[in-house]
Amino acid sequence: MTASPDDGDLVEQTPKIAVPDDVADAVRTLIRWAGDNPDREGLLDTPQRVARAWKEYARGYGEDPGVHLHRTFEEVGGYDEIVLLKDIPFQSHCEHHMAPIIGKAAIAYLPRDRVVGISKLARVLHGFARRLQIQERLTAEVADCIWEHLHPHGVAVVIEASHACMSARGVNTPGVMMTTSRIMGCFRDDQRSRREVFGLMGY
């Protein structure tokens, strides 16, 4: 099939979801309360855009991140060392101000008898991040999910992130990174294993 000049972008567009009136009205109220006019030209479509954006930001509520860890592989050629995926970028929103949290994560585990596809670790992170969050809980949820579904010898999760609720308001201090960690199993109980995994992560 040959595209005609009028076909434009051949990428299939995702149908726009319908925005309930009360949701759009809530955004209009917020715009008005902030000091602007929701009826001016530049803001006419903003309530629908904001509503659809938040449906996307919070799509983690519609999934179970643990599903990504159901398929595992036992044929690992005798490999019994640490599996680490680091510098995984993510975005979330804080539950206190609904402001962006932007950062990266390092996720490691020591397999017992099976491994999971590495992209699944990132999917677990994104599944929990795409909800209203605090960084401490996000770190714990990712680690607990891997521990529960893979039953490894150990799990270590370290997250570094900047918080717009601190950089763009309140104390107005940009450039500050918050670091949280959760370690379980051998990484918690054995000092040598802990040093090894943190060394691989670069800490």
Image (cartoon, rainbow, N blue to C red):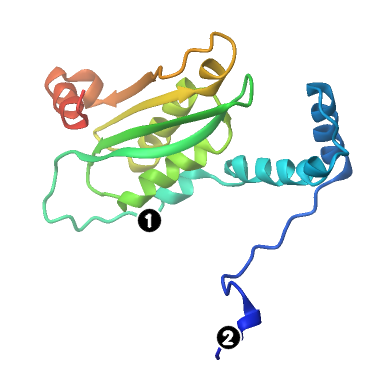
Question: Which amino acid type corresponds to the residue marked 2 in the rendered image?
Answer: Ala
Placement of the C terminus among the 4 image quadrants = top left
Image: 153 above or below 118? above
Numbered-mark total: 2
Q: Residues within 10 Å of mark 1 (few under 14, many from 20)?
A: few
Residue at 37% across, 56% down: 71
Choose top left, top right, bottom left or bottom right for residue 182.
top left
Q: Residue furthest top?
A: 171
- Horizontal relation, residue 136 to residue 184: left or right: right
Which circle's residue, 2 or 1, is located before the other in the chain?
A: 2
In the drawing, does residue 166 fall left or right of residue 74?
A: right
Q: Which residue is mark 1?
A: 71
The one nearer the camera, 132 or 33, is: 33
Q: Position of residue 163 (x, y in %)?
A: 50, 22
Report the residue marked by disc 2: 3
How far apart are the alpha carbons under marks 2 and 1? Answer: 40 Å
Provide residue 175's location: percent of width, then percent of height: 41, 19
In the rendered view of the protein, which quadrant contains the N terminus? bottom right
Q: Secondary structure at mark 1?
A: loop
Q: Amino acid at mark 1?
A: Arg
- Nearest-to-viewer mark from 2 and 1: 2
Residue at horizontal 59 percent and vertical 15 percent from the top: 169
Q: Residue at x 46, y 31 (%)?
A: 102
When asked about the image quadrant of residue 176, the answer is top left
29 is higher (above) or lower (below) than 170? below
Q: Residues within 10 Å of mark 2 (few under 14, many from 20)?
A: few
* Residue positioned 70% across, 62% down in the render: 15
| Residue 11 drawn at (x, y percent) | 56, 70
